[in-house]
Image (cartoon, rainbow, N blue to C red):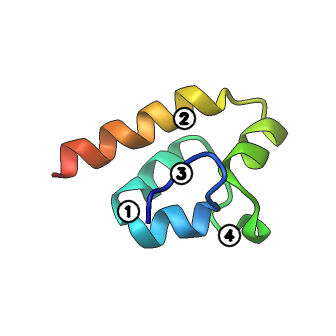
Amino acid sequence: MDCDQSTTIPDWIIEHPETTGVFSELGLDVSCGGKSLEYVCFQNGLDVEAVLQRLREVIEDRR
């Protein structure tokens, strides 16, 4: 699965468990009712592109 801004946070964690720490650092609820990363970022006043970049960095570091 190719995760992007429309992917739910639980799906991000299923595909890339190493991203759990990023969500915790940002104070985001990892269950979030199945809402997309974009929606959760918007609701929390976060820049979705910056969050995506951080998630991708963590994934790359893991490889």
Asked if 49 appears above or below 23 in the picture, the reply is above
Please name which of the two marks, 4 or 3, marks the residue nearer to the observer: 4
Q: Residue at x 51, y 43 (%)?
A: 25
Marks 3/2: CA distance?
12 Å
Could you classify mark 3 by the number of other residues whose Cα lies within 10 Å: few (under 14), some (14-19), or many (20 or more)?
Answer: few
- Are the residues flagged by discs 4 and 3 in contact, CB closer than 8 Å? no
Percent position of residue 47, x then y: 66, 26
Could you classify mark 4 by the number of other residues whose Cα lies within 10 Å: few (under 14), some (14-19), or many (20 or more)?
Answer: few
| Left-right relation of 50 to 42 | left
Mark closest to the chain's N terminus, 1 or 4: 1
Q: Residue at x 15, y 52 (%)?
A: 63
Mark closest to the chain's N terminus, 3 or 1: 1
Marks 2/4: CA distance?
17 Å
Nearer-the-camera pick, 39 or 21:
39
Percent position of residue 9, x then y: 60, 60
Residue placed furthest toward the front: 2
| Left-right relation of 57 to 2 | left
Give the SS element for disc 3. Answer: helix
Percent position of residue 49, x then y: 58, 28
Q: Amino acid at mark 2?
A: Val
Q: Amino acid at mark 1?
A: His
- Residue 31 is marked as 4
Give the SS element for disc 2. Answer: helix
Mark closest to the chain's N terminus, 2 or 4: 4
Where does label 3 land, which residue? 24
- Residue 51 is marked as 2
Could you classify mark 1 by the number of other residues whose Cα lies within 10 Å: few (under 14), some (14-19), or many (20 or more)?
Answer: some
**Image quadrant occupied by the N terminus:** bottom left
Could you classify mark 2 by the number of other residues whose Cα lies within 10 Å: few (under 14), some (14-19), or many (20 or more)?
Answer: some
| Left-right relation of 57 to 8 | left
- Are the residues flagged by discs 2 and 4 in contact, CB closer than 8 Å? no
Where does label 1 land, which residue? 16
